[in-house]
Image (cartoon, rainbow, N blue to C red):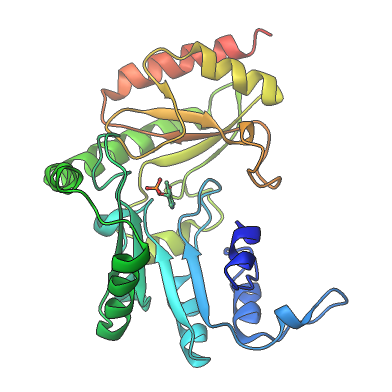
Amino acid sequence: MKHQAERAGVRPRLVDIADTDAVIAAITGDASGDDATADDTGPAALVWLETPTNPMLEIADIPAIAEAAHAVGAIVVVDNTFATPLLQRPLELGADVVVHSVTKYLAGHSDVILGAVVTRDEELFAKVRQRRITAGGVAGPFEAWLALRGLRTLALRVERAQANAAELARRLQEHPAVLAVAYPGLPEHPQHELATRQMDGYGSILTLRVRGGAAAAARLTGEVHLWLPATSLGGVESMLERRRRWPNEAPTVPEDLMRVSVGIEDVEDLWDDLDRALRASQEG
Ligand SMILES: *Cc1c(COP(=O)(O)O)cnc(C)c1O
């Protein structure tokens, strides 16, 4: 991604979004340290946040970061895909632009690829719209209809999936085959308080680390029946994936980490299948 950005003339500064001080230092451009380069100094023009992040579920402090960004005249963009507008409204928290992968929760049925850009800034809107006309993808009518149809049940899907995720996160914490669980709704999540402050719910993505490393995590994928091993998320069906199977996934993501997108099935059915598959993953 960094390489592609550089080809487009963008000089990205990559920072851990959970480290608000580091993010603000990157925004103001007060770089220090031996390896600071010209690209690290001077104010940023645009701040791109993902919160909760994919797949580590870190939380960015949107109001604090937006304040620092606006002080240097930078635009703040928030990828709100994991939260949906029902659980987090970045424009109200100070962001200038919100982007969504409509492919995920908004359409919700894993049958359409779409995106959305949202802003209150009319000048910015005109620029994005012009850019879409000349260089972007214009949604087809059938795709737009599918997305609209999906949106009608967004509230019900989010509510059910979130309740399922909260229950599974609690149970997984006690599971003998699980090393660690991350879910912003768990009091143990390092940014649980921040998530509670800026979100109206914790969503339905969680991660777990399987005891036994990458091999056990891969066996888990092979053992599930109801859960769908797939790279997408946010659909009505529950999905899981070992993220590091992709060579370009960040090396900071553990080898044994499974990203789990909880759907709207019966929670006991989900638990029975996952519990059995986790136990089987330990027999390698
Ligand atoms: C999937 C995803 C994207 C990309 O969306 P597509 O619709 O697949 O192009 C961007 N951001 C997040 C957080 C995602 O999960």
With respect to residue 147, does 64 lie above or below?
below
Q: Quadrant of the C terminus?
A: top right
Query: In the image, what residue occupies the spot 60% across and 14% down?
Result: 281
With respect to residue 279, does 266 lie above or below?
below
Q: Quadrant of the N terminus?
A: bottom right
Query: In the image, what residue occupies the spot 42% across and 71% down?
Result: 77
Query: In the image, what residue occupies the spot 66% across and 47% down?
Result: 250
Q: Residue furthest right?
A: 34
Q: Residue furthest front?
A: 134
The percent coordinates of residue 238 (x first, y second) are 36, 28
Closer-to-camera residue (58/44): 44
With respect to residue 283, does 33 lie above or below?
below
Closer-to-camera residue (83/184): 83
Closer-to-camera residue (219/180): 219
The percent coordinates of residue 215 (x first, y second) are 68, 19
Query: In the image, what residue occupies the spot 26% across and 25% down?
Result: 265
Relative side of 179 to 70, left or right: right
How many marks do you count on the picture? 0
Q: Quadrant of residue 40?
A: bottom right
Relative side of 284 to 54, left or right: right
The percent coordinates of residue 59 (x first, y second) are 50, 60
